[in-house]
Image (cartoon, grey):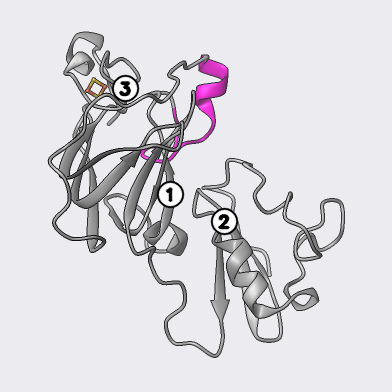
Amino acid sequence: MAGDKTTTYKGRNIDVQWDSRLCIHIGECGYSAGDLFVGGRDPWCQPDLVSDEEVREIVKRCPSGALTYNDKAQADNETPASCNTVQVVYNGPLYIQGELHIDRAADDMPGVRYRAALCRCGQSKNKPFCDNSHLKAGFEDYGAVGEKGDGLEIEGGKLTIKSVTNGPLLLSGSFAIVASSGRIAWQGKQAALCRCGQSKNKPFCDGSHNDAGFEAD
Ligand code: FES
């Protein structure tokens, strides 16, 4: 079944849904071994050719939340990762995983309750989500993180992400920031992360959005 924005690939026990609004073509699906996703095949995704467990595992690799699954035997499908993490991508967006509550996320985007790629170059036309505009804009930030945060008292729980008007992303909850090197660099409960692309202390906001006249909203 194909909609304007989403396509559903039906399986006996489990369906896979792809959301064109969120996909930034990272390729975790296309590069996966096995027959679930095969480029050039029609249909591209065939859930019945692999086990249900493989469907769940491969779909959850999608960092943007564009892919989701609907396991027909389960009332509740995907569950959040046990820790909330923000991965700073080299010259790219923020990959966020966990129990996500993103303001302005449409109700019919189930994937971004667990996984999302958020713009940090300031150029996306689909804010707060990344749309790969950083490539055309030549956004450069290698993803180092210099601060450490106050540490974690608990792991996991709700992580709220608000877009401050013409300003940063405000994250509240219990979460870690992972540098692009893979190092867990920062742990804490609240951070304002740059989404204008201009901060000199990325991934954190340093107020440069004001001087830059950043207009996001
Ligand atoms: S949002 Fe970029 S410096 Fe504040």
Q: Quadrant of residue 99?
A: bottom left
User: What's the residue type where badge 2 is placed?
Assistant: Arg
Q: Quadrant of residue 95?
A: top left
Badge 1 crowding class, 10 Å Cα cut-off, few under 14, some 14 to 19, many 20 or more, is many
Give the Cα distance between marks 2 and 1.
Answer: 11 Å
What numbered label is drawn on residue 196? 3
- Of callouts 2 and 3, the N-terminal one: 2
Residue 116 tag number: 1
The residue sitting at 56% across, 22% down in the picture is 135
Three-letter amino acid code at disc 3?
Cys
* Magenta-highlighted residues: 124-137
Q: Position of residue 217 (x, y in %)?
A: 27, 31
Label ID, residue 61: 2
Kindly identify the residue that appears in the image at 27 percent across and 24 percent down: 146
Of labels 2 and 1, earlier in sequence is 2
Answer yes or no: disc 2 within 8 Å of ligand 1.
no
Q: Label 2, label 3: how many angstroms apart (C-alpha)?
A: 27 Å
Q: Secondary structure at mark 3?
A: loop
Instruction: Give SS at disc 1.
Output: strand
Question: x, y percentage for residue 195?
Answer: 31, 28
Q: Is mark 3 within 8 Å of ligand 1?
A: yes
